[in-house]
Image: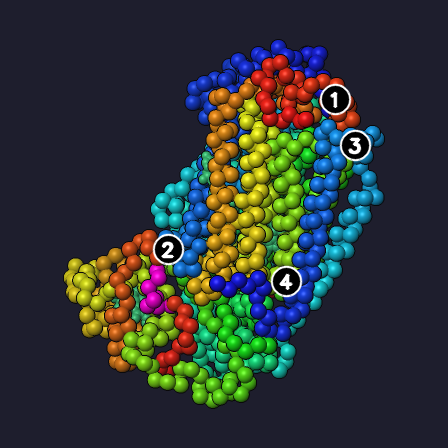
Amino acid sequence: MALGNLIRYKRKQEVDAVYEQYEELGQQQETYVLGMWTFLVTEIMFFGVLFVAYILYRWQYQPYFFAVHEELDYKMGALNTVNLLFSSFTMALAVHFAQLRKKKQQLLCLAITMGCAAVFMIIKYFEYSKKIEHGLLPGPNFVWTGEGVPANIAQLFFSLYFCMTGLHGIHVVIGLFVIGGLAFMVATDHPAITDYVPTEMVGLYWHFVDLVWIFLYPLFYLMPR
Amino acid sequence: MSAVPLQSKSPVTEEAQAKAQGSNYLNAGHTLASWLLTKDHKRIAVLYLISVSIFFAIGSIAAMMIRLELTSPRGTLMTSETYNKAFTAHGVVMIFFFLIPAIPAVFGNFLIPLMIGARDLAFPRLNLASWYMYMVAGTMFIVAMLRGGVDTGWTFYTPYSSIYSNGEVTLTLLAAFIAGFSSIFTGVNFIATIHKMRAPGMTWWRLPLYVWSHYATSVIIILGTPVVAITLVLVIVERVGKIGIFSPELGGDPVLFQHMFWFYSHPAVYIMVLPAMGVISEIMGCFSRNKVFGYKFVAMSSMGIAALGFVVWGHHMYVSSQSMYQGIVFSLLSYLVAIPSAIKIFNWALTMYKGSVWLASPMIYALGFIGLFTLGGLTGLYLASIGTDVHLTATYFVVAHFHYVMVGGTLMAYLGALHFWWPKMFGRMYPENVAKYNALLVFAGFNLTFLPQFVVGYLGMPRRYHYYYFAPEFQIYHIMSTAGSSVLAISLILPAFYLIKSLKSGPIAPANPWGAKGLEWEATTSPPDKHNFAGIPVVEGDVYDYNAEEEERRLRGERFDGYPHGGADQTPTPKEGVVK
Amino acid sequence: MNFPIVPEQASSFALEYDALFYVITGLTVFFTLFVFVMCMALIIKYRRGSNADRSNPMHHNTLIEVTWSFISLVLGLGIFTWGAKIYMEMREAPDDAMEIFVIGKRWMWHMQHSNGVRENNELHIPIGVPVKLTMISQDVTHAFYVPQFRTQFHVVPGRYTTMWFKATKTGRFNLFCNMHCGTQHSEMGGYVYVLPQNEWAEWMKNGGNRFKAAPKSLAEAGKNLYEEFNCASCHGERDGNRAPSLYGLMGRKREFTDGSSVVADTDYIRQSILKPEGRIVKGYRNLMQPYNFSEEQILSLAEYINTLGSPMPAGTSATAPANPTAMNATPITGAPTR
Ligand code: HEA
Ligand code: HEA
Ligand code: CUA
Ligand SMILES: [Cu+2]
């Protein structure tokens, strides 16, 4: 939806805030928010099925998964968790300021949120490159020297790890661009942004991305025996 | 349903209908760009109609290749590899590129805003994007076929698809993935539209059953499609990156793929059939001149199918080494999901009770649907029963079952919808008599093609088999089936001719040629205006407020010209449809 | 032409299975006719222009809805229960069942009896004795299906699956692979031979078919080897993605990745089997493992390859009788290997 607004931006003059298929602004906003929630449901199903796969395998290979998970750096993960939680907070603030029509504070909060997203990706970069250096990227070049765990199970663990955190990472990057687009539109007083609803929708998305990480972190980094 | 557009006294005035010949959504803009960049749901529906027909032709050609090859136990036309590619192309095209988008994306797009009294879908750009996604996906699959094709079957079972198959599996999976997004977009759009865009007075219990069934379909789409999308991505990752999630060599579980695949693909069969059921409800109501019997039960059974449909996927895997008790539970649940379908069948039949039954071509298709879907659904019970499925699974019995529900069911409904709403979409009438006999021909050809397959399946003919020279007793059934399929082919090519011809030379259709109820008939012209309604209609009164008694009285009172409502003087009186 | 409409009943499941099958068939016919007759009657009575009474139309009736839902449910649950009972019998092998191991690989079946007797694409079992198969696949999923026994189960890579049956009729029955497994899926099959118990014991004592008679010819021994080692999984009837076709290889000019070339003869085939990494055919990678065959075996393989016809041009059918994995109506005879 944010994308839709961006496309309209080019024709700033000819548009007014209510699209022709709607009767009034209220209906349009409700529809947008409903559409956003529906979209988030599809996102939940996207990640949900991966979580189910993870749970099934962890069930089957519990002790091995425990041993392998110690390869992950829980401190880096913790840092990222705090980082994302904070970004969710600033995102919520951005919505709050949008409601109050305090443009400057809203932009500041959006900027901080984007900063957090970037930091998240940088930390992820370090984590990933360390794993790859150690030959833990699944595939033909996978090396596993750990004791007591068959290499194939270790590879299965890392396959799940890279698939799930990778998909999450893609979502963070998308979030980065979407928030950026929103901030740009707010800053330039785009006519489609008449109120807080676009900000709220982006906020919903960002909270969702955050929430996924809240599940990913304990499942991969903090595994009880 | 009485609809009172705010700005006009009667629903559609004769001037408005006459004016519609010159100015409607079809000729609001003639450039290619006005079509390819349109945000009008009606034009997008037409775009979908064209592209879906092309894919149906492609899938059908593959089907005819299969049928020709199987007349001889050793085949005569192709190698085994080619045969495997043929049935894969047939399955993938028919499911992902024809049947799933067929009714929702063509008639759903066209009708939902008209039926609920909206000017468009909630997100017109998303709608257009969905068509483009579909085209990208379709093109990718065609490229995959040109580059050698795929031989995995439409089910893409691992590890065959992820490791062993040599074909263009990756490209095909990507195509299916993108097609999935196209249908997610449609689903999100329908849900938002049905929730928020209804006209004043259009309460949930006044929604046509067609809209209810699309609502249920959309719920399945948004819950199911992401699952299969990510599953296909995992297969791609495994194939390209050698990162195994399903590979047994990595301790993975190939059966997990089957669970994830069927978690979507069982509900997907209801994505294919629920919209068809919506069509049947509309047609049965209109041509019985009666409110659909048990309206609320029929509406709620759609929701029931959507919900229960998600808990029976394991019935495709009775012999795939899931645990015994798991299988038994799935079997039990499969019987529960049969009940809502039973409710619908009986309610449609009773809709004719005290009605005024008009056997026009859409009605014949609808009655054909009822018969064939009943048989198809009941043969699903052989398969749902876990004990009997052990012998029948993956035989031609299954092939016959799903062609009965998908071709005998959904394709019949699709053709019914095409004939029913053709005058509305294009403002022209087709030759009704030809259409009527053609509908009977479809019915006959269909049964001749697929009834023998039940028998040969029970005898043990496995599906996806190129050769069967080791069991020559199967041949007679294959010959019958091929003979039937050529009858079927004729009856399916014929409509393409007379429908396309009617666009140029068919009689001009009145706004409501069938005398049907519903906003799309009563409050819009044929073809509808670019903005659908003259004003926003306000709905008063009940859905399907037909009155068979009055209709009969009226019929007796005046000479009937075939199109009972509204258009007699504008229409060159066609002979067909006259009831003596 | 024979025109069967029901499959033979050859296992202890078949009788009860068919009983349930016919009950469901009865139900199907009943409901289809019921719906058909109901529709026809309504159409005729209420056709347009008929004089039927149409006053006070009924649009809903909760009692009717509940009744037909309830009847369908009860009938459905009845079938379910019976089906579940049959399934449980099928899944739980009796303790005294005779155990046989089955390996599925593209595109052949490999059976191993408990006393070490092995067979390919055939299974000899005694009548009246419960037989339990423990199955695994070497590559993709297959399914072991004998229609006359009314039972089948998937053969999955990476895990053992089991199935059992008790044959009640002697004779030869089709064995099908019923899970799509690639190019020659339809030919991955053979026969189950049910023998009278004494004949079967005799058969076992003689170590199965393969030990009964010496192979008729070298080429036939080669064919057995070719099947046993599954050469056809890579070498098809025409040049494939994985490996070149061996059809018509003898006497053809071969070009290699290093630019050299040679005309294929027995010695070249010998080298290709013992040291495939030595010369790689142009357009292919070194996928083939070296095989440590005895000289006699290699000779027989070369002889067999010599009998293969010319390679299939794309688009023609593979009806060649020499098709390496084609099923043979006669029991396979061949020399013990390894
Ligand atoms: C439009 C698509 C569609 C629909 C609607 C259905 C409907 C049903 N299907 Fe089907 N099915 C497929 C498409 C569909 N199916 C496809 C494509 C496959 C194969 C996939 C593949 O492997 O490639 C398949 C395979 C399939 C299998 C797996 C077979 C196997 O591979 O071993 C099973 C097993 O349970 C099954 C069961 C059912 C049941 C119980 C219904 C029920 O919903 C039917 C309900 C309807 C009725 C029952 C009829 C009306 C009721 C009455 C007249 C009252 C009497 C009722 C009772 C007594 C209960 N189907
Ligand atoms: C919507 C779904 C759909 C439809 C409509 C059909 C239609 C047909 N199908 Fe198919 N079928 C499937 C879905 C469908 N099928 C699926 C999912 C599989 C499983 C694949 C797998 O195993 O992976 C399958 C498998 C399958 C098999 C089993 C192959 C095997 O297992 O080895 C067979 C065999 O007979 C078959 C036959 C037919 C026939 C004869 C038709 C006929 O109804 C078709 C006849 C129609 C025509 C001939 C149309 C003629 C019209 C034109 C040519 C176009 C006209 C031009 C315009 C409209 C512009 N199908
Ligand atoms: Cu093995 Cu099919
Ligand atoms: Cu199903």
- Magenta-highlighted residues: C318-325
Q: Is residue C102 left or right of residue B324?
A: left
Disc 2 to disc 4, how far (Cα)? 34 Å
Residue beneath disc 3:
C52
Q: Is residue C43 visible?
A: yes
Residue B72 vs B363, above or below: the answer is: below
Chain assignment, label 3: C
Up the image or down, C48 lies above or below C242; here it is: above
For label 3, the crowd category at 10 Å Cα-Cα, with few meaning under 14, some 14 to 19 and many 20 or more, is some
**From the viewer's perspective, is C137 left or right of C269?**
right
Residue A187 visible to an observer of this rendering: no
What residue sits right under mark 1 in the picture? B556
Residue plotted at (71% across, 29% down) = C48
Amino acid under disc 2: Thr
Q: CA distance from mark 4 to mark 3?
A: 45 Å
Residue ID at (56%, 32%): B435
- Element at badge 4? helix
In the picture of the structure, the residue carrying the numbered disc 2 is: B76
Quarter of the picture containing the C terminus of chain B is top right
Whether the residue carrying mark 3 lies under 8 Å from ligand 1 is answered with no
Across and down, in percent, residue B302 comes to 69, 41
